[in-house]
Every structure is written in C-alpha cells, then in structure tokens.
Image (cartoon, coloured by chain):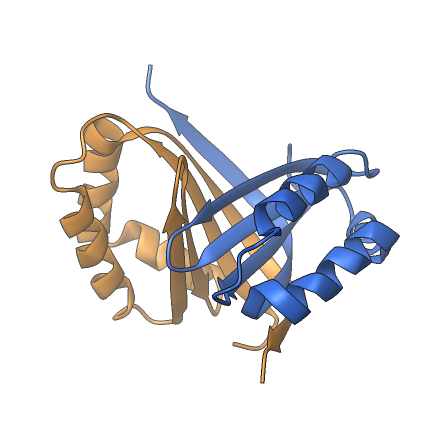
Chain colours: A orange, B blue
Amino acid sequence: MTPPYYAVIFTNNHTAQVEGYNEMAQKMEDLAKLQPGYLGMEHAREEMGITISYWKTKEDIANWKANVDHQMAQKMGREQWYESYRTRICLVERDYQFNKD
Amino acid sequence: MTPPYYAVIFTNNHTAQVEGYNEMAQKMEDLAKLQPGYLGMEHAREEMGITISYWKTKEDIANWKANVDHQMAQKMGREQWYESYRTRICLVERDYQFNKD
C-alpha cells in the first residue's frame, strides 16, 4: 500500500437491533477481498463503529458499492442496523508508520 | 464539514503498558480542539485503535504535528504505549450520510 491510493472511511451508530449484523459484516469483508483493487480493511467499535477500507482507485470503490450482494447489505443496514452513518471517500496522499523493535 | 478537507487516519496497536494513556489521549483531544483548522475527531478501539481527526488544510495538520505538547505525547507514545502505528494523510473528496428518521 503505497500512496496515492484511496480510503473509504465509514463511521456509524447502531440501532438497538444487532441480529444478523456480525455475520453480514464478515460476509461483506470476505466479498470485498474478491473485488478488483481491494487493498485492505480495518475496523474498531466502541460507542461508534469505524470501518476503513483501502482501494487502488475510485473506480474500484464505485464497483464495490454497486456489487449486488453489497447493495442488499447496504439496504438492510439502512433498514435494520444503522441509526446513522457517514461515508467519506478519501485520497491517501501520504502514509508513514512506526514499529517498535 | 464540506469537502474538500483533510482526514488523518491514525491506526495503532498498543503495548501491554496502558498507564497514563487515556489521560494523555484526552489531553491531546482537548488541545487539538484549540488548533486552527480543527474540524473534529472520532475514535474507536477493539483489537486495534483507530483515531481519525479532521482538518481544513494540510498546513493545519503540520502545525498540530509540530505542537510542542503534542510532540512530547508522540514521543511518549513511541516509547511506552504503541507497539506500532500508521498515520495516513488523506484528502476527503466526497462525503455523504444517512440518518434514520
């Protein structure tokens, strides 16, 4: 993963209904891995959920958004699991890291 | 927050040592709010920690990184709290949201 590449920041707040959510999230992560241009995914949840997925190009993101199974998951998300969410499409310009030796 | 603006994605893994971390994280969030160009911050932690801060410009990010108190916190982070981290500087190009009514 060397810049420039894209990050999709998906932040969300859940409804009280959680049934089926974890299974669907796992299924979508497995499916995203098969998409062209997929570079990786990271997530954490406390009060708010944050999922970041990384992609080679904007077109890869558009293709993933349009994926039929993913479309259905998005619809279920809006109907059942999410109180609110926000999606940000971002160009990663610079990237640096630290590893303790 | 209307694009274009900047997001700093900070993902990290902690060492076993957590003493003083939460206090410092809160102190840095309070301090960031006083910086020019600060737009907001979101975070969640499970296995991995994710903190995203939002800024008007790249210069605002550079100024915050160079802040003396923040520099000291970064140094303590590398010495004590972080096993590894990765920082990504991102241009937010597009942004859309959903709110259940």
Q: Position of residue A7 (x, y in %)?
A: 50, 58
Residue found at the very far bottom of the displayed protein: A101
Residue found at the very far top of the displayed protein: B101
Q: Position of residue B6 (x, y in %)?
A: 68, 48
- Nearest the viewer among A11 and B48 is B48
Residue A94 visible, this angle: no
At horizontal 63% and vertical 43% (from top left) the residue drawn is B23
- Nearest the viewer among A25 and A33 is A25
Left or right, A83 with reference to A24: right
Up/down of A68 relative to A16, above or below: below
**Picture quadrant of residue A30:** bottom left
Up/down of B52 relative to A4, above or below: above
- Nearest the viewer among B73 and B101 is B73
Q: Position of residue A19 (x, y in %)?
A: 12, 36
Residue found at the very far front of the displayed protein: B19
Quadrant containing the C terminus of chain A is bottom right
**Picture quadrant of residue A16:** top left
At horizontal 60% and vertical 52% (from top left) the residue drawn is B21
Q: Position of residue A21 (x, y in %)?
A: 18, 42
Left or right, A78 with reference to A5: left
Residue A4 visible, this angle: yes
**Picture quadrant of residue A29:** bottom left
**Number of dots carrying numbers:** 0
